[in-house]
Image: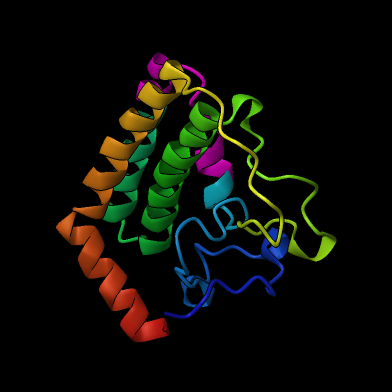
Amino acid sequence: MPKFDYSLHYAELDLRAHPELYRVGVGEQGVLLVQPYKSELLPHWRFATPELARQSSEAIYAMFLAYLRAGEFVGADMARKFLQMGFTRARRYANHRGGKKYDGAVPEDKKGQSGAHGRAELPRSPEDPVKAESARIFKAKWDEAEANEEYAALKKAHKAQYG
């Protein structure tokens, strides 16, 4: 699978106007870069409590469906990534008090990219049940998005056309 292209100048790009430049990549790659979708989705993304996670995941899932109705695969995929990120970040906070998973700072050349980047993982804290419930809420909506047949068809078509 082609990796997400981190070399593009996303702050200057409108991926709604240029969907041909978008690569799905792996997992959440690019979730906080791709405009205008980042700016549209980020204000709705919250996971601190189950109630906020419920409101957030429902709002983002509604945007996912709206992007699909508009035929905007990139927007739908970004919404899917925000749902996935809601799950992964809530799980991180459930497992690591304060949310810090790795020891040390992110290397300068890896900022904005997911991963350990050679850093050791810190020991897990006792599970935070509030954040664990937030994670479960986001996981259900993420699974719903992944199972959407229209999304799967648009994803397949995008990859066939653009790589």
Q: Position of residue 161 (x, y in %)?
A: 35, 84
Residue 74 screen position, x and y as percent: 42, 62
The residue lying at 61 percent from left, 36 percent from top is: 123
Say above or below: 26 vs 47: below
Q: In the rendered structure, which segment of residues is drawn in magenta?
A: 39-55
116 lies left or right of 51 = right
Q: Is residue 28 left or right of residue 159?
A: right
116 in relation to 63, above or below: below
Residue 50 lies in the magenta stretch: yes
**Which residue appears at 15% of the width and 59% of the height?**
149
Q: Quadrant of the N terminus?
A: bottom left
Q: Residue furthest left?
A: 149
Q: How many marks?
A: 0
* Horizontal relation, residue 43 to residue 11: left or right: left
Q: Which residue appears at 35% of the width and 34% of the height?
A: 138
Residue 77 visible in the picture: yes
Residue 12's x, y, as percent? Answer: 71, 63
